[in-house]
């Protein structure tokens, strides 16, 4: 073996060691870097009201959509205090009280309570609908959408996923209610939803909060190694979550269009020819498709 060949062989054999040292160095660097600063919580924090309200909800609200009117009325009455606490929270600035532990402690139970709180709001809305009070039903469903926004504000990915489910409860019921609303109610509901849509967090903001929480929670080399080896799986799960996030944005914006179009038709006697006809009297701006970033398409 020539000296040149031997040198090449030594260089080739040393590559794995260099790679391992580089990976270890990167892991040590990530584990040693300064933690992101903690965001101050508002005082008072409406999120605290949501937590308390969720704990007060009776357990049978999950099947509100199958209840007869008498049972539904009893359920709504028994949850009146919880709904009042929730509405108090909706009037305040809100930010999720994060738990910086890998198991999230009691946070999972709080999130399930949030979902039941949204179901209690939907039960109230369904009762109003059954009693031919569509205006009151709209208010309950809009409060569910507000809860979905505010209960996830400043939270991590799991908070946003629950927030998506909560908003879906409100928007799905509003979609079914459109034909019962007059032009004024449709316009007002569309205007409120348009505001709520702009107040919701973007996907980039959600990811920024998720990364900040992860860096503060998973600080050991072991977690850095897990993060590195499971990167493909994590990225796949994040992609699925992003699709859910943007699908709900799409449903909300389609609801905006349907409400505004119905109001336009009731006022004008015919459907709008395009979304441009709805601006600025029925919508402030043409909603954008969250998947493409372009104006949404409308078919009269």
Image (spheres, rainbow, N blue to C red):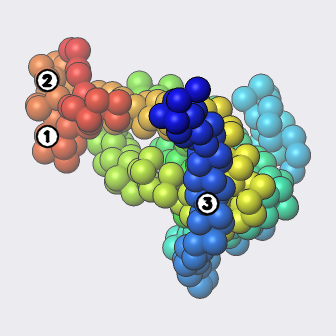
Q: Quadrant of residue 211?
A: bottom right
Percent x, y for residue 232?
60, 32
Going by the image, does 207 lie left or right of 108? left
Q: Which disc, if any, is residue 274?
A: 2
At label 1, counting other C-alpha atoms closer than 10 Å, the crowd grade (few under 14, some 14-19, many 20 or more) is few
For marks 2 and 1 on the same chain, the one whose residue lies earlier in the sequence = 2
Mark-to-mark CA distance, 2 and 1: 10 Å
Q: Quadrant of residue 238?
A: top right
What residue is disc 3 on?
25
Q: What residue appears at the point 76 percent right and 34 percent down from the top-left corner?
A: 64
Going by the image, does 295 lie left or right of 175? left
Mark-to-mark CA distance, 3 and 2: 57 Å
Percent x, y for residue 103?
83, 56
User: Judging from the image, what secondary structure is the residue with disc 2 in?
Assistant: loop
Q: Which disc, if any, is residue 279?
A: 1
Q: Which disc, if any, is residue 255?
A: none
Q: Quadrant of the C terminus?
A: top left
Percent x, y for residue 176?
50, 25
């Amino acid at each position: 073996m020539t000296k040149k060949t031997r040198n090449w062989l030594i260089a080739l054999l040393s590559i794995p060691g260099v790679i391992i040292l580089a990976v270890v160095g990167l892991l040590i660097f990530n584990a040693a870097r300064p933690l992101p600063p903690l965001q101050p919580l508002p005082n008072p924090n409406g999120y605290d009201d949501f937590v308390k309200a969720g704990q007060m909800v009776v357990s049978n609200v999950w099947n509100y959509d199958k209840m007869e009117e008498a049972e539904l009325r009893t359920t709504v009455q028994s949850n009146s205090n919880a709904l009042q606490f929730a509405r108090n929270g909706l009037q305040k600035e809100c930010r999720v009280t994060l738990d910086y532990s890998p198991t999230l402690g009691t946070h999972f139970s709080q999130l399930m309570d949030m979902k039941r709180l949204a179901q209690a709001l939907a039960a109230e809305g369904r009762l109003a609908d059954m009693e031919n009070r569509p205006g009151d039903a709209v208010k309950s469903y809009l409060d569910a959408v507000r809860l979905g926004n505010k209960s996830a504000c400043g939270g991590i990915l799991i908070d946003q996923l629950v927030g998506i489910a909560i908003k879906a409860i409100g928007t799905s019921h509003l979609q079914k209610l459109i034909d019962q609303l007059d032009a004024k109610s449709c316009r007002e509901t569309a205007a409120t939803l348009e505001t709520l849509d702009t107040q919701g967090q973007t996907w980039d903001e959600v990811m920024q909060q998720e990364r900040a929480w992860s860096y503060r929670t998973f600080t050991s080399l072991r977690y850095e190694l897990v993060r590195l080896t499971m990167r493909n799986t994590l990225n796949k799960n994040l992609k699925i979550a992003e699709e859910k996030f943007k699908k709900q944005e799409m449903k909300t914006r389609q609801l905006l269009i349907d409400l505004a179009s119905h109001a336009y038709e009731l006022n004008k006697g015919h459907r709008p020819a395009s979304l441009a006809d709805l601006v600025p009297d029925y919508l402030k701006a043409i909603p954008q498709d969250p998947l493409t970033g372009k104006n949404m398409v409308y078919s009269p």
